[in-house]
Image (cartoon, grey):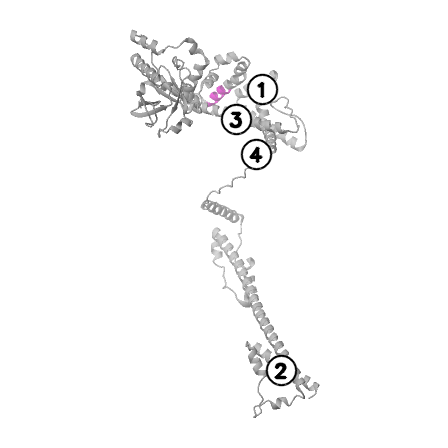
Amino acid sequence: MSLSNIRDRFHRKRHRTKDDTYRLVQDDQLFDVDDIDALNNKPDRSPDGDNDSMNGKFANDVEKQTYEQQLIQLQEQLVAAMIENNMLAQELKQCKENEENERLKNELEREKKRNRLLQDQMNNSDRSPRRRETSKKVVVPTVPTGSNVEHCDKMFEPESLNVEPPRTRVDRLWERIVEFLYDVMEDFNDITQPEHLMEEQKEPLSVKTLKENLRRFKVAIKPVTDTVKGINNLLTWKSRSYTLIFFMLYMYSVWKGWFLPLMFFMMIVRLFVNFLHFKGFKFCFNYLDAGEPEQESDDTLGLSDKFNLVLMVATKVQNGLGSTSDQLEKLKNLLTWKHEGTRRVFTMLCLAFLATLFVPTSFLWRFMGLGFGIKIFIVNGIYNKYPKIKKRYDSTYRMWQTLPTDAQYERQCVRTEMDRYIVIPRATSALERSIERHVSLSSSDDDDDNDETAEFRSIFSLPVTECPIRGWLNGKRTVLLGKDKSLFTLLSKKRGKLYLTKSFLCFARENYPSPRNIVIPLQDIVSIDKVKINQRMPGKGMTIQILIQSDGKQNVLLFSGVIGRDDIIRDVQQVMMWMHQKS
């Protein structure tokens, strides 16, 4: 067999195999490699059942090996072609499914659009009473499928709906009114919870930011401060002619009842001047002259200047908050009957109420306006120029100065409470005089007037009549034991001094001067004894136990580390005996 015959047979075999492969792919069937080998190695139809006939077709073994190699390559190509055809068939099927999904999505979007359109038409027909009858005539077809989609899209367009527009202006006006009422009702039906605002992020302390904020605050507050300065200059008669003109204009407008129109006219003029400034017309116009502005230095700040700037701002904030708190506390105490000036305010309010019942309102406003003008322009001008006259005749100023703050009111309450325990002196007998000489109750005049006794009274809020007796001016060092009676309290912050007066036994702490001080009235002391806390320690101990009974309750105080305990107990007992004899 020649080489050309072998090539022809190979090509016919290859074409026949491709046709069989395409047929298998169309039938969605895949053969295994073993099946293909079985087809290729199909036995001959000769009855002998041997391979002698096939071997006789080849001239030698080389052609046979070549033929077998070509069959193996053909087999590999066939398998690759079958796999590729299978992958292409799957991709084609997936593309068809995607096209179907896209078509369904487009139909769904059309349906949503038509549903929205129908819902809007139904809402409009429900809101307008005249459209209710016409809305019943609208025919809604079924959901289209297939080729009727485009026809139904045209059917659902607004022009194709059978809805009659409003005919007259009255109908349109009525429709707008009804829609407005429906909108208002829907707004009231929508109940929502208030939204919690996010907290602004706080910036860290920076000298640059502090300086910039100070500059912004000065620029923003400058119109207000200039207005306040102008009012102050006006009321203090800095420019006498201008203040006199303003005073006469004010009194005349109040007398004629033109004060409010005058105020509104001045506001309109001020806004018109601001409009001219906004348009570029630069000129100076102020009702109230604040004087020459302060010049600010633009020098760069060094390290010490930055520290001084922060210190200055902190000082201003501290003093400003303290002053504002004092004024607010005074006002609160005035309105809560914590001062005798509240009775004056109440009396004036009652008289004003009676005046409004019997005096015509126009006459009352005129009288009040004239009195207010005389007070702020004439009387206050005299008071500001002559401070002695202000302190003597200005009852409002004197009452405001005597109003107490919360701390002052608490101090007054403490002094009032202590007055109940102060011993009232009376005629003394010979025995009492001997006790006074022994205990040295009477103090010298020098001790009453020195700075130490004044500081002592300010610490415990005691009256002038109460001062330490002789020998107790510097106090007795001791330690206030806690409830656990531990010796470790000797090193704690409860160290202090005991002071003895004619009516009180006082304990002042070293580290906490005022808030944790103790004032014990001698009338409430039931007993004072010597005790020993730790029995293992040698000696008789250095602790004093004081039993106090007040308002039906008993309390025990222990003072340890006392030097000269016997003398202290003897002095306290003798003063208590003297006090009981005096009362």
Which of the marked residues, 1 or 3, is nearer the chain's N terminus? 1
Q: Residue at label 1?
A: 234
Q: Residues within 10 Å of mark 3 (few under 14, many from 20)?
A: few
Span of residues in magenta? 361-369
Residue 349 visible, this angle: no
Quarter of the image that includes the C terminus:
top left
Q: Amino acid at mark 3?
A: Gln
Name the spot of residue 468 as percent of width and height, x first.
39, 15
Distance, label 1 to label 3, CA atoms, is: 30 Å
Q: Residue at label 3?
A: 318
Nearer to us: label 4 or label 3: 4
- At a point 38% along the width and 25% down the height, the residue shown is 480
Quarter of the view holding residue 224: top right
Res 205 label: 4
Q: Main secondary structure of the magenta part?
A: helix
Q: Amino acid at mark 4?
A: Leu
Distance, label 1 to label 4, CA atoms, is: 41 Å
Distance, label 1 to label 2, CA atoms, is: 119 Å
Which of the marked residues, 1 or 4, is nearer the chain's N terminus? 4
Q: Amino acid at mark 2?
A: Arg
- Left or right of residue 253, residue 578 in this image: left
Res 16 label: 2
